[in-house]
Structure formats: C-alpha cells, structure tokens
Image: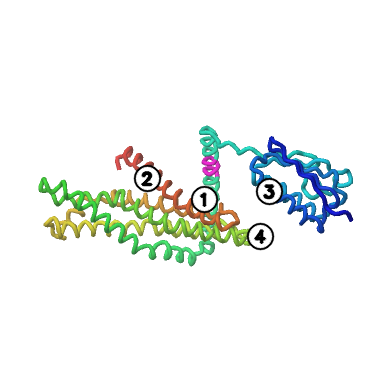
Amino acid sequence: MRAPQASIDVGEAGRATWAPTGPLTLKTVADHWKTLQDLWTHAALRHMVVDVSGVEAVDSAGLVLLKSVRERCARASIAFELKGVPERLHAFFTFGGLDRGHAQKVSAPKPSPGLVTRLGEAALKTWQDLRNMVYFVGNVTVAFFPCCLQPKRFRIKEVLYYVQRSGSEAMPIVFLVSFLMGLIMAFQAAVQLRQFGANIFVADLVSLALTRELGPLMTAIILAGRSAAAFAAEIGTMKVNEEVDALTVMGFNVTEYLIMPKVNALAVSGPLLTVFANASGIFGGLVVGALGLDLTPASFLVEVGQILTLTDVLSGLAKSFVFAVLVALVGCLRGLQTEKSADSVGRMTTSAVVTSIFMIILADAVFTVLYHEFDI
C-alpha cells in the first residue's frame, strides 16, 4: 500500500485546499491528522476545500477523519466543501453523513424574533393554556358528580390525608403571617387614628380588612406556595416515572383517582384556614391595641363583634373556597402537563405557583366588582 500523501495550499483569500492521496484508512489517518494541524494555525483561513479525488480507499476511520475536519471547521466558522468524491465511494460517504461534492456553508445566526412575533407567540401560548385549563376543569366537573352520588368512589382516606398536608400542617405559617399582618395593620392605623382620639376604630379596620380581603388572600397565597407546588411536583414525578400512564393502562380514571382527592381536600382546607387566619390577625391587632393604644382586650373584642356581620365573614369564606379550588386545579394541571424530564418537573412546579397567584388575584378582582355591584 502506498504511503499517505497530501498537498495543502492556502490562498490569499483564506481558501485552503487539502488533497489527500493514497489510502485514507485506519493506518494512515494519524499521519493525515498531523498534517492538518498546521492548517488550523492560519488566522486568515475562511474556506476549507477537501479534494478526495486522489484517494484510493476509505474505511470508517477515514470517514471519521473527514467528519472531524468538517466539525472543526463548523466550530471555527469556516466554510467546508467536499469535492472529487469517486463514484465508487458515493454510497459509503452518503451512509456516513457526508454530502457528495456539496459545499457546507456556515449557517448564519438565526435572527431574533421581533416584538410582533414575540407578542403573537405569547398570545398563542396563552390561548392554548386557557383551552387546556377549560378542558381540565370540564373533566374535573364531570368526575365530581359520580364521587358525590357514589360515596365509595369519594376516597375519603385520601381526602383526609391531603387535608392534613395542606390544612393542619399549614396552620403554623398561616398563624404567623396573619398575626404579623394584623399587627402591622394595627400599627399603621394607629398612626392616623391616634390623632383624633379614635384608637378604638383600629379594631374595625383590622377585623374588616382581614375577614373581607386579607385573610382569604394571604391564606390562598400560602396555599399556592405550599399545596400547588406540592401537587405539581407529585403528579409531575409520577409522569416522569410513567406511573400516570400505568394507571391509564390499568383502566383508572386519572382525574377521579389523582385529582379529585386533592381538589376536595383544598376545598375543605381553604375556608377553615381562612377562619383561623382571621382569628390570628384579629389577635395580632388586639395585642397592639392592648399594649400600645390603651385599649382593653374586652373593648377591642366588643368593637370587633359590633362591626362584623355575617355577610362580611361569609363573603370572605366564599372567596377562600374559590381561591382554594383554583390553587388545587392549577397545581394538578401543571403536574399533568409535565414532560418526561426532571427539568420539566421544576419548571412546572414554578409555573404552578406563579399561575396560582395570578388566578387568585384575578378571581379577587372579579369578586370585588361583583360585591360592589350587588352591594355586599
């Protein structure tokens, strides 16, 4: 077998031609690669032409050498052109992924989409997400009635399990946040009311703000951070492990088996936690009134009882019920939308929290308008 030979010419315009001759096989590729090392040192190199018309034989090692040269050119933004491929080697080169005499130009960087394009893509994504949400809510609604009509399908043990996880285990953080919120509001209100000798009205402000607005809202945001993320991560991990697919193959209704216990649990936990949050916030206001505003605990509680009505309490509980159901639905939906990768579980968990908070604020705005229109 003839010794490997090659000629390399580098023109002034940065065009280099490498023309190996003889065999291009496992025994010769090392020598050819050493020959090419000096070529990469030319700073003016912009176009690489490989002429294989003088090659007698090529094996898989030679094919790898040619592909390595092409990849090296691609990384350095150098145009690559392969020419002179003998007819007898066409099939082998095509099988190996090398074009026949086709110049591979360096692809230009893809231009970034404009503002209109980005807005259109965002609108389409939002519309698709809304469609998925409506379809998912429809499935949950259809699955709700069989559970009510047939108590055996209600899965009371699973509901109680999620009530404990999302309800009783959330009580410490709900108490702390609500207590501090009542404390803060009482201090802020006292700054102005003290000037008029109206310290007692701190009880009115704290109790009304908590029962009608802040109690349900803060509780729902806490549920979004705890329960929506937990539901999305739990169902998303099941998707990655193909457990959801296994349940479907075995004939289980995934919505009834996985989703309904979580939705029912949060529908129960949300209003109960809201009542607890209201009491905690009022207790925070009472502490400020007793220690800093010369109010007795009895007078503070009497004022709270006089200002609050059943409508105030029930309007807040109605909000909390809707907020809790929204949190459960969004968390479960994001879990079912998880792709089969660990990265997707993290992204969908984050999306569950963000989407839940957005839906809570949107629903709160709708409630505010409705309560205003109906004078509630």
The residue that disc 1 covers is 141
Q: Few, some or many C-alpha atoms within 10 Å of disc 2 (few <14, some 14-19, many ≥20)?
A: some
Sequence-first tag of 3 and 1: 3
The amino acid type, in three-letter code, at marker 3 is: Arg
Q: CA distance from mark 3 to mark 4?
A: 48 Å
Tell me if label 2 and label 4 are in contact, CB under 8 Å: no
The residue that disc 2 covers is 364
Q: Secondary structure at mark 2?
A: helix
Indicate the quadrant containing the C terminus: top left, top right, bottom left or bottom right: top left
Asked if residue 310 lies left or right of residue 8, the reply is left
**Image location of residue 227, percent across then percent down:** 44, 58
Q: CA distance from mark 2 to mark 3?
A: 58 Å
Q: Few, some or many C-alpha atoms within 10 Å of disc 4 (few <14, some 14-19, many ≥20)?
A: few
Q: Nearer the viewer, mark 3 or mark 1?
A: 3
Sequence-first tag of 1 and 2: 1
The residue that disc 4 covers is 249
Sequence-first tag of 3 and 4: 3
Is residue 148 visible from the viewing direction of this image? no
Residue at 79 percent of width and 52 percent of height: 63
Whether 162 is drawn above or below 3: the answer is below
**Image location of residue 7, percent across then percent down:** 79, 45
- Which of the two residues, 222 or 204, is positioned nearer the viewer here? 222
